[in-house]
């Protein structure tokens, strides 16, 4: 459907062999972090992080489970694979300084295809200022597999877990919600149109923003930087990968609290709203349960209300309650709806 450069010329991976491929990848990799003492090329990378808590997080992406190459350009996939790992480090209020990338490849992939993938990986590394310091390369019979480990750090005093939200804290979200999920619905729809008539070209222009949110996720490292600048240490934080409801429930469970969220406070982009309605989906449901937004969900002490209110990129969507109240949504109509990890049936 989407043609990438890799289809125009093709170099078989066999011609390079595993070591040739690793040398080729090492050549394109530049290190910028002073903490990266040694990168690709030895038995292990060497990293020196001083006086900080070290953060390590991994994510594995499998073709057919997490991505569909019919509509995912390899460059975007590489970028997103890094971004979602950096997002996990950001969710601890930390910064990512190194990543490792392990790939499983079949002979379906050419050197040009791997170059496209790494183009995206390198682009994300440059954007987030983290170094690619190692990985592993193996053959795969089950399609493309990408496993990334992110290494980062945080000053121990500002480390933020899911576990310390307290009564009356404000519940905040960055950016807007549901865009990535609704973008995926567009891509799936256009794929079906293409499969039934290969002459049809995808109609994506009107949906550029939401499709971009699906294909090219960003980690909210800017929000972590802003919190630091503002002198705010969240009491709890998580990145929204499974949807606001499900991720807020993680905070509630791990902090031993309840939560009240207001439907009219949920940040939903206009295109997300219109497209949800086009698919006969309730925009609120999409915002609560659509995954892959990679926005940050965090709680702060009430005393920060004025500073947070002045930030256009951060919305206060509710507050923390006693555990006995559970996690609920106050709807625009005035009903109280219990939040569930997958609560489609309530709407
Ligand atoms: P070993 O046999 O010790 O596992 P490898 O031959 O797998 O070593 O890897 C050699 C070097 O290349 C190591 O530094 C490793 O981290 C790096 N490396 C291997 N595969 C990748 C990859 N896909 N991306 C980045 N670095 C890689
Ligand atoms: Mg190895």
Image: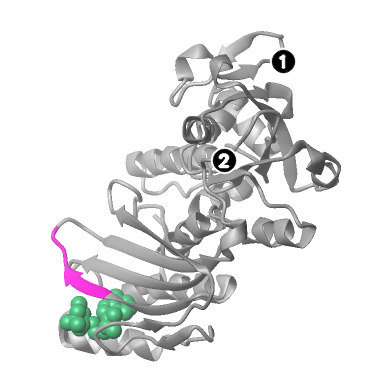
Secondary structure character of the magenta stretch overall:
strand
Q: Which residue is mark 1?
A: 332
Residue 155 versus residue 251: which sits nearer the camera? 155
Q: Mark 1, residues whose alpha carbon is within 10 Å: few (<14), some, or many (≥20)?
A: few
Residue at screen point 21% across, 58% down: 143
Residue at screen point 52% across, 40% down: 163
Q: Is residue 90 above or below residue 102?
A: above
* Residue 240 left/right relative to 173: left
Q: Looking at the picture, how far across and down is residue 186, in whole percent?
A: 50, 40
Disc ID at residue 23? none
Residue 54 versus residue 182: which sits nearer the camera? 54
Q: Is residue 60 above or below residue 197?
A: below
The way the protein has been coloured in the rendering is one colour
Quick check: is 321 in the magenta stretch?
no
* Quadrant in which residue 224 is drawn: bottom right
Q: Is residue 9 visible in this depiction of the protein?
A: no
Quarter of the C terminus within the rendering = top right
Residue 95 versus residue 135: which sits nearer the camera? 95
* Quadrant in which residue 114 is drawn: bottom left
Q: Is residue 326 visible in this depiction of the protein?
A: yes
Indicate the secondary structure of the residue bearing disc 1.
loop
Where on the image, by quarter, is ligand 2?
A: bottom left
Q: Looking at the picture, how far across and down is residue 225, in whole percent?
A: 69, 62
* Residue 310 left/right relative to 243: right
Point out the stretch of residues depicted in magenta: 136-141
Residue at screen point 41% across, 52% down: 71
Disc ID at residue 164? 2
């Amino acid at each position: 459907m989407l043609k990438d450069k890799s289809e125009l010329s093709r170099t078989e991976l066999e011609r390079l062999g595993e070591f040739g491929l690793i040398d080729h990848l090492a050549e394109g990799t530049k290190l910028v972090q002073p903490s990266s003492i040694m990168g690709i090329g030895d038995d292990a990378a060497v990293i020196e992080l001083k006086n900080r808590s070290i953060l390590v997080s991994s994510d594995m992406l499998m073709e057919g489970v997490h991505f569909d190459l019919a509509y995912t350009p390899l460059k975007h996939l590489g970028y997103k694979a890094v971004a979602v790992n950096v997002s996990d480090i950001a969710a601890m209020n930390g910064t990512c300084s190194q990543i490792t990338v392990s790939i499983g490849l079949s002979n379906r992939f050419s050197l040009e295809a791997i170059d496209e993938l790494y183009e995206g990986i390198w682009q994300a590394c440059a954007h987030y200022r983290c170094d690619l310091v190692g990985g592993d390369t193996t053959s795969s019979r089950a399609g493309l597999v990408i496993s990334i480990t992110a290494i980062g750090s945080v000053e121990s005093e500002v480390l933020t877990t899911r576990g310390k939200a307290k009564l009356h804290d404000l519940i905040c979200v960055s950016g807007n919600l549901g865009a990535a999920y609704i973008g995926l619905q567009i891509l799936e729809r256009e794929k079906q149109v293409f499969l039934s008539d290969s002459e049809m070209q995808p109609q994506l222009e009107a949906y550029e923003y939401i499709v971009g949110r699906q294909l090219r996720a960003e980690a909210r490292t800017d929000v972590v930087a802003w919190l630091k600048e503002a002198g705010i240490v969240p009491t709890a934080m998580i990145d929204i990968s499974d949807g606001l409801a499900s991720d807020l429930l993680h905070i509630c469970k791990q902090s031993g609290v309840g939560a009240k969220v207001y439907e009219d406070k949920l940040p939903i982009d206009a295109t997300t709203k219109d497209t949800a309605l086009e698919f006969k989906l309730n925009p609120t449901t999409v915002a609560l349960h659509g995954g892959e937004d990679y926005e940050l969900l965090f709680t702060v002490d009430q005393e920060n209300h004025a500073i947070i209110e002045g930030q256009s990129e951060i919305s206060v969507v509710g507050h923390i309650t006693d555990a006995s109240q559970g996690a609920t949504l106050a709807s625009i109509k005035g009903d109280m709806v219990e939040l569930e990890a997958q609560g489609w049936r309530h709407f």
